[in-house]
Image: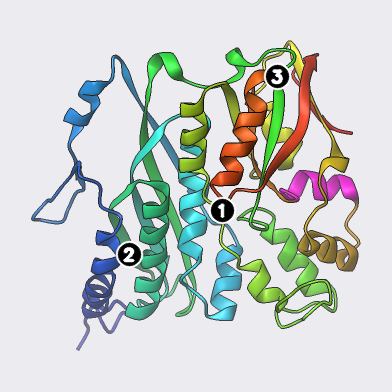
Amino acid sequence: MTSYEAAGVDIAAGERAVELMKSRVARSRRPEVVDDASGFAGLFDASAFLKYRRPLLATSTDGVGTKVDLARRLGIYDTIGHDLVGMVIDDLAVCGAEPLFMTDYIACGKVVPERIADIVGGIADACALAGCALVGGETAEHPGLLEADEFDLAGAGTGVVEAGEILGPDRVQVGDVVLAMASSGIHSNGYSLVRHILATTDLTLESAPAELDRPLGEELLTPTRIYAKDCLALIQSGGVRAFAHVTGGGLAANLARSLPPTVDAVLDRSSWEAPALFRVLQGHGDVPQPEMDKTFNLGVGMAAIVSPDAADAALRLLTSRGVPAWPLGEIIAGTGVATLA
């Protein structure tokens, strides 16, 4: 007899996964979230926007890329959700938006309830860290298209910002200071190059290079640092002109997106040392420095451009919040380019 389950879709397993993740999802709840008894939609009370003069909604969508393959190979699923939230929600913070809510989408070859619950639980935990609610999501079983242990995930987030308070290139001025906020590791960009290095060198996920304190695989799965609340705190302290979330393209390319065409950002490469993980990958993979620069964050996950009189206070605030930060460079007259010197 032919059935949906015989075709590879286990509805009961999906329902079990939902039950397992419920308590962790509830931790991300905000007071504006309204329950939808049907469960088909996430509801958010828009009357919260009445405190704004002209509220603008900001939205972002992203995934985690091929980092999911390393999570699959290592059988570690409770950190990859942090990466998803970091990629989506920290993009919202760049324009100064407060993150409100997020939804996720997981496609897998086979629903294993405990695995799905770990992934979504990680998303929910990270949403709580970012101050946004996980209001819904979808888990889709794709037998025949994905192997039983394969999965991918994506998400979308929504935030709100006052129209007159949007951060960005139009605020940046000559004399402003660029501050670096340390990354927690590779975050979620460059993993295709990482996987290529693993496939073509003597490095494996089980390798324990002397420069690292733990096996390479664990180091590579370090979850993305989430900066949203730190960025909002900086905005409240005053003097912030713009942010740059350092993702695909590296530090210089992402920072250039936050510059007007009349200035340059000159960044001091000697102001920090790339963490050991990047040096291990570069050395074993024989990766040229320009390729490292445009592929990885090299230890800087977010950059802030602030007025010169706000720089010291901004650094003190970040330090008090547990975010390693330092002066990275300055804004000079130019043509909208960021350079590492």
Residue 168, label in figure: none
Which residue corresponds to mark 3?
Answer: 176
Q: What secondary structure is found at the residue carrying circle 2?
A: strand
Q: Look at the numbered disc 1 and give the secondary structure of its residue.
A: loop
The residue tagged 2 is: 139
Q: Mainly helix, strand or loop, the magenta region?
A: helix
Residue 261 placement (x, y as % from top left): 71, 13
Q: Amino acid at mark 2?
A: Thr
Q: Residue furthest left?
A: 37
- Give the residue pinned by disc 1: 225
Foreground mark, 2 or 1, reads 1
Residue at screen point 28% across, 14% down: 53
Along the polypeptide, which appears first: circle 3 or circle 1?
3
Scheme of image coloration: rainbow
Give, as a three-letter code, the residue at label 1: Arg
Between marks 2 and 1, how big is the CA–CA gap? 25 Å
Q: Which residues are magenta?
A: 289-298
Can residue 310 be found in the magenta stretch?
no
Residue drawn at 40 percent across, 77 percent down: 115
